[in-house]
Image: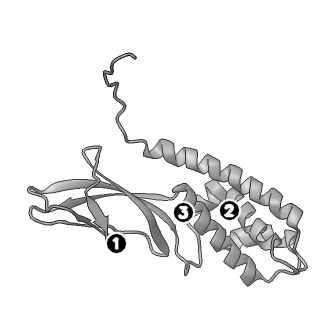
Amino acid sequence: MDRFTKHIMPQVPGCPKAVIEAEVLRAAITFCSDSWIWQSKLEETVLSGDDEIPISIPRNSMMVGVYIAIDGREVNTYTLDGLAAILDDAVTADTLFEITVFLAPSRAAVELPDILYNEWFTGIESGARALLMVMPEKPWSNPQLALANQQQMFVELGKAKMKARRINDQSRLRVQRRPFV
């Protein structure tokens, strides 16, 4: 958090460090939840007769989405139960599942992963500044700058969504025959 805090602190004079850190975390959670840019790829083998796919995630993170596939084909017949996907039907043979887990920092996180700082610093920093500057009746309040920071965060969020979509485009494109009308 300190890496973000030292850049934000000069723009919100008088704001306590703990408040800045809380808003950086809040902005990071929102950014990751909305964009699905923080990902972890796993492979899990489920043995014949089992119907549960365990999902492991890094410490200080929470799962905000999941994509499950077998041989590149999406699996839709499951429900999530905590950190496990429960299949509607047990597998009939040992099966290798490819899992992409979409993550966000947990609310108890005290540090953020390097990918968020190295690649998405501007989006998270702008989001945190917007949250801080919109606080009413504080010495660092500035509704005009809050709006500008929020717009910058939305631009970065759009870039992150596009990048995440390109990374996760595992669908097969097919041309289907249809009558010309």
| Left or right: 78, with 17 as reference point | left
Q: Position of residue 70 (x, y in %)?
A: 24, 49
Q: State which tag comes first along the sequence, 1 or 3.
A: 3
According to the picture, the residue beneath numbered tag 1 turns out to be: 83
Question: Dot 2, how many residues are within 10 Å of its Cα: few (below 14), some (14-19), or many (20+)?
Answer: many
Q: Position of residue 107 (x, y in %)?
A: 55, 78
Q: State which tag comes first along the sequence, 2 or 1.
A: 1
According to the picture, the residue beneath numbered tag 2 turns out to be: 124
According to the picture, the residue beneath numbered tag 3 turns out to be: 33
Q: Residue at x 79, y 59 (%)?
A: 149
Q: State which tag comes first along the sequence, 3 or 2.
A: 3
Q: Residue at x 84, y 78 (%)?
A: 136
- Total marks placed: 3
Q: Nearer the viewer, residue 112 or 78?
A: 78
Q: CA distance from mark 2 to mark 1?
A: 26 Å
Q: Residue at x 27, y 61 (%)?
A: 78
| Left or right: 1, with 146 as reference point | left
* Image quadrant containing the C terminus: top left
Question: Dot 3, how many residues are within 10 Å of its Cα: few (below 14), some (14-19), or many (20+)?
Answer: some
Amino acid at pointer 1? Leu
